[in-house]
Amino acid sequence: MRRRASLVFLALAVFCTALSPLLRWYAFPRLAKVPAGRYQSVVMEAKDATLVDYGTLQPRRVSKVTMIETLKGNTELAARVRAETGRDAVVWDTLTYVAGPDGAMVSRIPERYVFDAHTQQPLHAGGESVDGTPVRRDGIEYKWPFLVRKHDYRYFDMQTRTSAPIHYRGTRTFHGLDVYYFEQTIPWTRVPLPRTLPLGVTPDTVRQLGLERWYTTTRMFWVDPVTGAPVDGEEDHREELRWTGHPEKQPITAFAGHVAMRPDYVDSTVALVTSQRQLVLLLTSYLPWGLPVLGAALLALALVLEIRGRDRRAIPGDLSHDGGKPARPAPEGR
C-alpha cells in the first residue's frame, strides 16, 4: 500500500514540475490578453487653465477644462484583422473630447488604434488613424506590455502623429502599489488643427487667418508593472496659434494647463488594476514558483514512503504466534 502511494506522489511531483514552465512560457502568452470588447472612459481636468476664445481669438483664464477619453473595443473589425494577419488583434476606437468650463465643446479628436492583444505592439491593419488621417504607429500607446521592464519605450504621440522615447524614471509607491514612473517631453512642434472646432470654425478658417498650431507637452504615467496598465496620468500641456511666416508677432495661447486624472477615476482605476494583477501573477509568479516547491515536497514524501516500505520488508526472523517473538530452539539431548 505504501509503495502504491509513493508512486502516486512521485507522479504528482513530476506533473507539478513539468507544469510550471508550461504555465509561464506557454499558457501566459495565450491567456494574458487585452479583451477585444473592452469599454472604458477616463475624465481628466485642468484647473485654472488658459483657453482661446475662437470668437475673438483671445486667450482667457478659465476655472476648468475637462478632457474625456472614451475607449471602445471594435470586436467585428478585430476579428477581420485577426483573419487577415493571423495575430490576436484588438481594435480600439477612441475619442478625446475637450470641453470648456460651461461644458461647451472645444475640440474632439477620434482615433483608431490596432494592436496585438498580448504584446501591445501595433498592427498596421484595420485603418489605424488619428482624426481621420491614416497613421503608422511605432511603439505603444495607452497601455504598456504585461510585465513592464525598467527601460525606455517608444510611445506614440497623438498630436504630432509620431513616436518618441518615454523614459523610465524609477519605482514609486502609488495608492499602496509599487509602480513604475515614466515621463516623456515633446518639444514645440507644429501639429495639425483638430477637424472639429467650436463656433463652426474649421482648420481652413484658421489657416486663412495666417495662423498655425504648435504644441508641447510633458506627460507622466504611473504604470503597474504587472499588468502594464497606467493607474494615473498627468500632462503639462501647452498649445499656441502662431502667425505663419511672422515669428516676430506674439503667438496666441490656445491652451495651457496641468491636466490630471480626476480623483474618483484614479480610485476606480487602481481598484480595477489591483484585481487584474492577481490573475497575471497567478500565471507568472504564484504557480510557476509554487508548483516546483510543491513538486519537491511530493517527491520527498514519495521517497520517505518508499524507504519505510523497504525497511518493513527487510525485517528478518521467523515470527511465531506467541506474541510475535521468535520461537525458542529445542534443547539438545544428552
Image: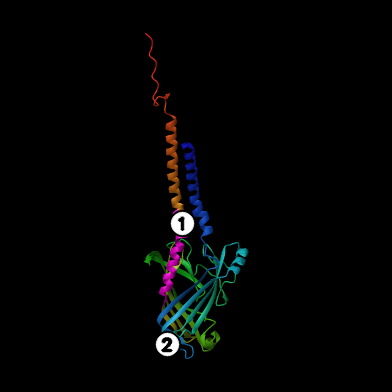
Q: Amino acid at mark 1?
A: Leu
Q: Earlier in the sequence, mark 2 or mark 1?
A: 2
User: Do the residues bearing badges 2 and 1 touch, measured as CB atoms within 8 Å?
Assistant: no
- Whole-percent x and y of residue 44? 44, 76
Residue nearer the viewer, 75 or 203: 75
Which image quarter: residue 148? bottom left
> Real-space Cα distance between discs 2 and 1?
52 Å
Relative vertical location of residue 318 with respect to residue 119 in this rendering, above or below: above
Mark 2 = which residue?
60
Relative vertical location of residue 156 with respect to residue 106 in this rendering, above or below: above
Q: Residue at image x 48%, y 48%? A: 16
Q: Is residue 76 magenta?
A: no
Q: Secondary structure at mark 1?
A: helix
- Whole-percent x and y of residue 153? 46, 66
- Whole-percent x and y of residue 92? 54, 70
* Residues shaded magenta: 259-286
Q: Amino acid at mark 2?
A: Arg
Crowd band around label 2 with a 10 angstrom C-alpha radius: few (<14), some (14–19), many (20+): few
Q: Residue furthest bottom?
A: 56
Q: Is residue 279 magenta?
A: yes
Mark 1 = which residue?
282
- Whole-percent x and y of residue 315? 42, 28
Residue nearer the viewer, 269 or 92: 269
